[in-house]
Image (cartoon, helix red, strand yellow):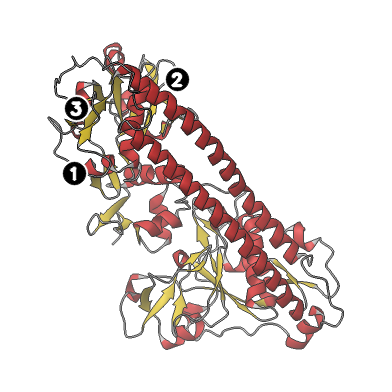
Amino acid sequence: MDQPPTDSERALPPGWSLVRVDQAGEVRLGRQRSPEQDSGAHMTKYVRAANITPAGMNLTDLLEMNFTPAEREVFGLKVGDVLLTEASGSASQVGRSAIWRGEFDLCCFQNTVIRFRPHLTTSEYALVVFRHYAAAGVFAGAARGVGIQHLGGSRLAELPYPLPPLAEQTRITEIADIRLAEIREAEARLRSALHHLNEQVREIMATAVAGELAPRSPQTPEPDRARGSSRSGQINLFEETLNLDVPGLGATVPEGWLRRRVDHVGEVRLGRQRAPKHERGRNMRPYLRVANVYEDRIDTSDILRMNFEPEEVAIYELQDGDVLLNEGQSPELVGRPAIYRGEVPGACFQNTLIRFRAGDGIEPEYALLVFRHYMHSGVFREIARWSTNIAHLGLERFRALPFPIPPRDEQQRIVAEARRRLDAIAGQTRAVQASLARLPEFELELLAAAVAGELTPQDPHDEPSSELLQRLGPPRKTQATLSSLRGDTMPKRRPRPTRQAEPTPDLAAVLKENGGSLPLPELFAQAGYNRDLPEHVELFYLALRNALGGTIRLTGDAAENAELEVADAA
């Protein structure tokens, strides 16, 4: 196969050689999982792709299957082995690597993992090379597959490997480790700053609905109390509402405020259900769905259309100022709200959304603050009902929530002050996020310099790598004693000219590639989704909702670590 020009064509420093990966060390693909190995006389812990993280090995959930003594000789791990993920739903995650440091006396590895056993190189330097290849897209370029990207043991073996003298490898990794640690520390500080900014956002929401953000001055006249109560002092927020005792809902409202159910201060409606009969018609209209409604913004990058009859348009057409909330979402994001401001003229909305249309005396922007507070404080999560890990807000439960009502002029002051503070925090957040976005570039530059011999000067007294290669020869192959162990255990795949770099929505394919079943968090990772990206969380749960009951099913209970399996699995 063609070798990446970035390494094969670069002039190497003195004393370096360019070899193949399988000259620098032994390459082997792990053993395939199958039902008959789920029990036996030689049950052994094994590493799979989910155990290899960017931070190193995560061995909190090692599984077991039967490995015979002969198979243990072939697939057993030794201290210093470098393990790489063989496949992922995202090409950018293929080849993620970590060093096995003998955490367990006896452990093997599955065929979702490739083992590199160093021969001419140190484990630490091999990790630098493989991390560089992952960050620079070399592994992504070598991967093959549709939906699930496979690196393959043979393709890894054929890649070029820049080989410095052994002593220089140690110097390189010492410097690289120090600088990588500095990058990790910078990342931790930036993420801490981001966390504090998010906490400030939540605090603004909480003080806004508690009457503490823009309180009325003593000179301000008493508000008109003709909206339903003549009581002075604090007013019980829970009268005629759900009997709740959850964080984020105080039991009282400030003096001069009122309280009502949500459906008493505005119109609440669930959107129209999508159905095949609506995919064509004479009155095709754009509509918004949960994928379009983010917190405080409408995303118009992917707008779908379906047929709405004129009488349905009268019910479901959106107006400026309508507040839209995610009815079905992940537990953390259920109820996520935004205001429709005419971004998509003539748009209607689907039943994955709830519409709140503010009534007289209610500012839509103030209602948005209330609902954002309910999302961040866990009120929506508390009243939601869960199906697997998809939470449903529920129209009736949402309608019955309490809604604190300040006088109209105070609503306007609250909105103005909240917007001023939130805009300032948004500016700081963008600056922090921009700094975080630059860190991968810094890491890539560091790794590139490491494998190019630019981190430390060459020492003419070091034994050249060519002499090391001549002295040690090729790596010793682990001999298999069973015919079933010959060669790679994964079938060869035909190369394709295009490759997917985004997370895959085909969760059933991911399950099939991993033996037919996975815990939900592991399925999330194996499908190429990133929990740090809210849009990935949403896309995953949308894919899960579409697949449940069809191509995949839930086994066991609906807890956080529920097991999911292919629907046609035996």
Residue 262 visible within the image? yes
Q: CA distance from mark 1 to mark 3?
A: 16 Å
Residue 2 visible within the image? no
> If you read the primary sequence from the N terminus, does the residue marked by circle 1 or circle 3 appear first?
1
Q: Note whether 188 is above or below 424 in the view shown.
A: below
> Label 1 neighbourhood size at 10 Å, few (<14), some (14-19), many (20+)?
few
In the foreground, 368 or 417: 417
> Label 3 neighbourhood size at 10 Å, few (<14), some (14-19), many (20+)?
many
Q: Give me the residue at 65% from left, 72% from top.
A: 126
Tag 1: amino acid: Asp
Q: Secondary structure at mark 1?
A: loop
Tag 3: amino acid: Arg
Q: Which residue lies under the disc numbered 3?
A: 261
**Which label sits on residue 344?**
2
Q: Secondary structure at mark 3?
A: strand
Q: Are discs 1 and 3 less than 8 Å apart at CB?
A: no
Q: CA distance from mark 2 to mark 3?
A: 30 Å
The C terminus lies in quadrant: bottom left
